[in-house]
Image (cartoon, rainbow, N blue to C red):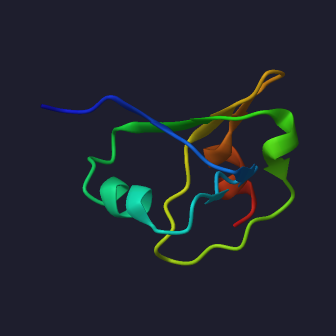
Amino acid sequence: EDIDLIIIPGVAFDLSGNRIGRGFGYYDNFLRKIHNSTKIIALAFEMQIVKKIPNDKNDIPVNKIITEKKVINSIEYRVSSI
């Protein structure tokens, strides 16, 4: 079966959708196996949004972050920073 939506947890997120998780890479490994059309979102509090999170080629960012105040379209931030 196809997966339409995945909700990813995290300790902190930046506007580009990078995240700090628990440090074991389980979600990144899982997301590599998922079809590109699957929506990947995160639920977070505003206080969990930070300016920049270091990332590497193995990190898979979320597409959107939903906070109590707004919805952040992380894809737009990744495109504008290229």
Q: Position of residue 29 (x, y in %)?
A: 34, 63
Would residue 30 be found to the left or right of residue 8 on screen? Answer: left
Q: Residue furthest left?
A: 1
Q: Quadrant of residue 47?
A: top right
Decide which of 42, 21 is in the foreground and name it.
21
74 vs 57: above or below: above
Q: Residue at x 36, y 54 (%)?
A: 31
Quadrant (top left, top right, bottom left, bottom right) of the C terminus:
bottom right
Q: How many labels were placed on the picture?
A: 0
7 vs 12: above or below: above
Q: Quadrant of residue 19?
A: bottom right
Quadrant (top left, top right, bottom left, bottom right) of the N terminus:
top left
Would residue 72 be found to the left or right of residue 28 on screen? Answer: right
Q: Position of residue 9 (x, y in %)?
A: 56, 43
Q: Position of residue 2 (x, y in %)?
A: 19, 33
Q: Residue at x 39, y 61 (%)?
A: 26
Q: Residue at x 74, y 66 (%)?
A: 53
79 vs 72: above or below: below
Q: Residue at x 54, y 36 (%)?
A: 41
58 vs 74: above or below: below
